Image: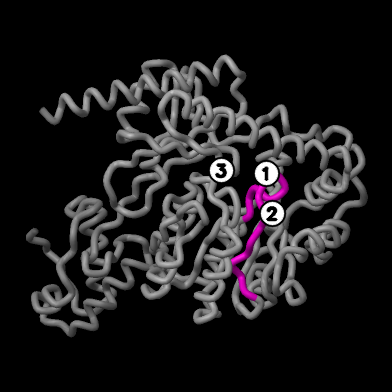
């Protein structure tokens, strides 16, 4: 590709390349000249060319793929969670909790409107802080040193943690397959995602070791109900990951325990007692409702101080009305019983649907969480297309993949709100879609 790249300084070269991208002379995915070739063509020092590419990487204009070279970044939007807009199909890929299982807020709302909170007052409601300290501390090895922060949900906490501790171009270890919001957060922040494979016991040790060798500055891990796979970190795997992370005490380890109160599995942390930079994030959106935008973050003192600086009173602290409402709900025995019943319901409905698929020749297991992660004998995309013809909107595994690989053979399904008849019909239609897609595949190979 013959490009008119100009400039003598790193800033001039970066501006020249940015202009080529903005004019469309360089498209998403296009490779930039190797550093050595660029330096020779411009008659500059190699370090100047490196600095120019570094500026563009931090600005999110280009991405570096190691030996794969430097390429123009793809600005394509990441798939989002939730209902698909303007679809007449029955959506079974939403990732949503069942609205009928979310506690009624009416009674609690009537009792939380106390005196107003003014500028300069503590940003955490005292009652909520007392409750949250026990909730978080019982599961953390370094509980004695933890500090608490309240944010507007788990995604808000992760974004703020990364923004204050990382710079554009920093590498972040993400689970693969990965939660869509995590992919979105990392891409918008201009960080470099490093995929870590997930198996039935969570992040793999070899995968995390490889990521650490690539110089990741942060690790984002889901200890339970990993989305989309449903995997939960086992006690054995957690111990192995803690041992590995002992050699990297200043790598930020963030655990997003999003399913917390609803989980049917024990919590095993990968944060060791001597790790220096860590955070455990628990939101209330899965059991109190997505509109309850509140998460509790427990972290080491230094990380908490950095996070608090981004939540100063008068700008972006979380409403005390919302904090009081959360406290009223999570200390209500009736609400807690309802949350427990909801967790049991999700597990039972997912297990039943997995059994329906298994009976139809598609072996499936129910892990933990709101969704099922189904392995198919054929690529998922033609199966989702066949399901659309049968009135279903399902989500294929390709949306959740980080590493470039063959087409995904997975479906992520949200089926806990289907009645028995609808569950039977969907299982039958999936089996038929798999058979049709398989037959078409065989015919195409002849």
Report crowding for label 2: few under 14, some 14 to 19, many 20 or more residues within 10 A (C-alpha).
many
How many badges with numbers are in the image?
3
In the image, which disc is placed on residue 285? 1
Q: Is residue 261 magenta?
A: yes
Left or right of 67 in this view: 308:
right
Task: Please report the bounds of the magenta region as a residue range.
Answer: 257-272
Residue found 21% across the figure and 51% down from its top: 27
* Residue 351: percent from left, percent from top: 58, 33
Coloring applied to the structure: one colour
* Residue 389: percent from left, percent from top: 36, 17
Residue found 62% across the figure and 74% down from its top: 272
The mark nearer the N terminus, 3 or 1, is: 1
Residue found 52% across the figure and 46% down from its top: 227
* Residue 189: percent from left, percent from top: 45, 60
In the image, which disc is placed on residue 367? 3
Please tell me whether mark 3 or mark 2 is closer to you in this view: 3
Left or right of 278 in this view: 203:
left
Residue found 62% across the figure and 30% down from its top: 349
Foreground: 201 or 369?
201
Foreground: 444 or 400?
444
Left or right of 5 in this view: 239:
right
Screen quadrant of the C terminus: top left
The residue at which mark 2 appears reads as 295
* Residue 393: percent from left, percent from top: 44, 25
Screen quadrant of the N terminus: bottom left
Q: Tell whether label 2 touches label 1 (CB within 8 Å).
A: yes
The mark nearer the N terminus, 3 or 2, is: 2
């Amino acid at each position: 590709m013959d490009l008119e790249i100009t400039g003598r300084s790193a800033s001039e070269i970066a501006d020249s390349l940015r202009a080529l991208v903005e004019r469309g002379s360089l498209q998403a995915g296009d490779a930039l000249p190797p550093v050595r070739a660029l330096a020779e063509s411009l008659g500059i020092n190699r370090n100047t060319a490196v600095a120019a590419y570094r500026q563009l990487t931090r600005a999110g204009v280009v991405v570096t793929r190691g030996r794969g070279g430097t390429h123009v970044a793809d600005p394509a939007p990441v798939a989002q969670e939730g209902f698909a807009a303007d679809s007449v199909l029955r959506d079974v890929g939403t990732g949503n909790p069942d609205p009928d299982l979310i506690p009624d807020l009416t009674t609690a709302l009537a009792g939380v409107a106390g005196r107003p909170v003014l500028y300069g007052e503590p940003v955490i409601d005292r009652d909520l802080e007392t409750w949250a300290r026990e909730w978080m501390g019982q599961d953390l090895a370094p509980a004695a040193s933890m500090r608490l922060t309240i944010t507007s949900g788990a995604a808000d906490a992760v974004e703020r943690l990364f923004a204050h501790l990382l710079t554009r171009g920093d590498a972040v270890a993400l689970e693969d397959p990965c939660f869509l919001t995590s992919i979105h957060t990392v891409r918008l922040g201009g960080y470099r995602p490093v995929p870590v494979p997930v198996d039935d016991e969570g992040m793999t040790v070899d995968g995390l070791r490889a990521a650490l060798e690539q110089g990741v500055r942060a690790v984002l891990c889901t200890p339970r109900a990993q989305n989309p796979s449903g995997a939960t970190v086992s006690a054995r795997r957690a111990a192995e990951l803690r041992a590995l992370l002992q050699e990297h005490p200043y790598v930020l380890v963030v655990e997003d325990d999003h399913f917390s109160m609803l989980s049917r599995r024990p919590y095993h942390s990968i944060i060791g007692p001597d790790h220096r930079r860590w955070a455990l994030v628990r939101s209330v959106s899965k059991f109190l409702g997505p509109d309850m935008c509140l998460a509790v973050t427990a972290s080491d003192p230094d990380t908490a101080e950095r996070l608090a600086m981004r939540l100063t009173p008068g700008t972006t602290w979380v409403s005390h009305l919302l904090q009081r409402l959360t406290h009223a709900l999570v200390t209500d025995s009736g609400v807690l019983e309802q949350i427990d019943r909801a967790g049991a319901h999700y597990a039972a409905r997912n297990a039943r649907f997995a059994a329906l698929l298994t009976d139809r020749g598609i072996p499936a297991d129910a892990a933990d969480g709101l969704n099922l992660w189904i392995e198919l004998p054929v690529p998922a995309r033609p199966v989702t297309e066949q399901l659309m013809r049968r009135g279903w909107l399902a989500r294929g595994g390709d949306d959740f993949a980080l590493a470039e690989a063959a087409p995904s053979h997975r479906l992520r399904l949200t089926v806990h709100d289907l009645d028995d008849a609808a569950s039977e019909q969907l299982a039958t239609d999936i089996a038929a879609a798999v058979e049709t897609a398989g037959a078409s595949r065989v015919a195409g190979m002849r």
